């Protein structure tokens, strides 16, 4: 596997920024169950995530929403919720059956073998839990260039801007919008990709949004499932 080095003189490198949950893997609700436990432990609420949108939003945003639903001051509590989540995710992952989604491993292998592509992450997961999920399925090794994760106080668009900054640091130069592709399974992924001028690829492999619903968010490309490597590369290279 070869990643383009920092400062590489090539100007034709494409940075592919991947979401995790619903795009690369499914964890059979492990993350949601960990959130319910964290809310019960920290906020003493038994209704967990009731009324809280969790699809495509960041872990930090979920923590803020949980505090507001409970009428609790966010200062300090958000950090406590995120720390509790980090401690609970490993056990939930080990207790549940998950899977790598169709064509994911094949595409990561094919793209990583190219010298004009760099795979990175753009995810609402915390860095620790995102890495843990990908290590469980032997996918972390494809992301040697790193990526951007959920940080307290930063929304999904902010994470996208951080991903763009990291990609530009990796490239050693400013990147044009067409040199970045965001792949995700929710309208939030599409919106954050557009926020940084990237091309957006929507895949209807998550637990909430249908292909028709994703298409209404006007992604650059949309698929029911991630295409095989040949078709995805053809789509990425299309004007």
Image: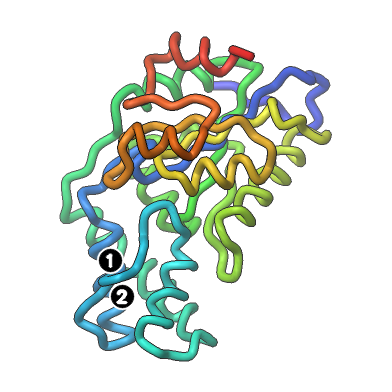
Residue 195 spot, x, y in % from top left: 65, 46
Give residue 41's quadrant in the image: bottom left
User: Which image quarter holds the N terminus?
Assistant: top right
Q: Is residue 220 left or right of residue 104?
A: right
User: Which image quarter holds the C terminus?
Assistant: top right
Q: Residue at x 31, y 37 (%)?
A: 210
Q: Is residue 143 visible?
A: no
Give residue 170's quadrant in the image: top right
Contact between marks 1 and 2 (CB within 8 A): the answer is yes
Few, some or many residues within 10 Å of mark 2 (<14, 14–19, 20+): many
What label sits on residue 38 in the rendered view? 2
Residue 10 spot, x, y in % from top left: 78, 19
Few, some or many residues within 10 Å of mark 1 (<14, 14–19, 20+): many
What label sits on residue 52 in the rendered view? none
| Residue at far front of view | 216
Q: Which residue is mark 1?
A: 34
Residue 52 spot, x, y in % from top left: 34, 68
Q: CA distance from mark 1 to mark 2?
A: 6 Å
Observer-nearest of 49 and 168: 49
Secondary structure beneath dot 2 equals: helix
Q: Residue at x 60, y 22 (%)?
A: 2
Residue 3 spot, x, y in % from top left: 63, 26
Q: Is residue 183 visible?
A: yes
Q: Residue at x 61, y 53 (%)?
A: 157
Residue 232 sits above or below residue 126 on the image: above
Residue 212 sits above or below residue 74 on the image: above
Q: Residue at x 49, y 78 (%)?
A: 79
């Amino acid at each position: 596997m070869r990643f383009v080095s920092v400062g590489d003189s090539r100007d034709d490198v494409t940075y592919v920024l991947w979401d995790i949950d619903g795009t690369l893997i499914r964890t059979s609700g492990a993350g949601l169950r960990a959130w319910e436990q964290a809310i019960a432990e920290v906020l003493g609420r038994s209704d967990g995530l009731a009324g809280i949108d969790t699809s495509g939003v960041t872990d930090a945003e979920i923590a803020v929403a949980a505090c507001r639903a409970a009428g609790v001051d966010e200062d300090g509590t958000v950090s406590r919720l995120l720390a509790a989540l980090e401690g609970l995710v490993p056990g939930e992952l080990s207790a549940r059956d998950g899977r790598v989604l169709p064509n994911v491993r094949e595409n990561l292998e094919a793209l990583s073998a190219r010298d004009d592509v760099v795979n990175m992450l753009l995810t609402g997961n915390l860095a620790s839990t995102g890495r843990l999920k990908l290590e469980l399925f032997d996918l972390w090794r494809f992301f040697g260039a790193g990526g951007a994760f959920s940080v307290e106080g930063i929304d999904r668009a902010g994470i996208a801007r951080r991903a763009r900054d990291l990609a530009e640091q990796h490239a050693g130069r400013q990147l044009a919008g067409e040199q970045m592709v965001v792949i995700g399974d929710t309208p939030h992924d599409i919106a954050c990709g557009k926020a940084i001028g990237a091309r957006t690829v929507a895949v209807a492999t998550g637990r909430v949004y249908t292909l028709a619903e994703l298409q209404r968010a006007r992604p650059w490309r949309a698929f029911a499932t991630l295409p095989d490597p040949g078709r995805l590369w053809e789509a990425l290279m299309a004007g």
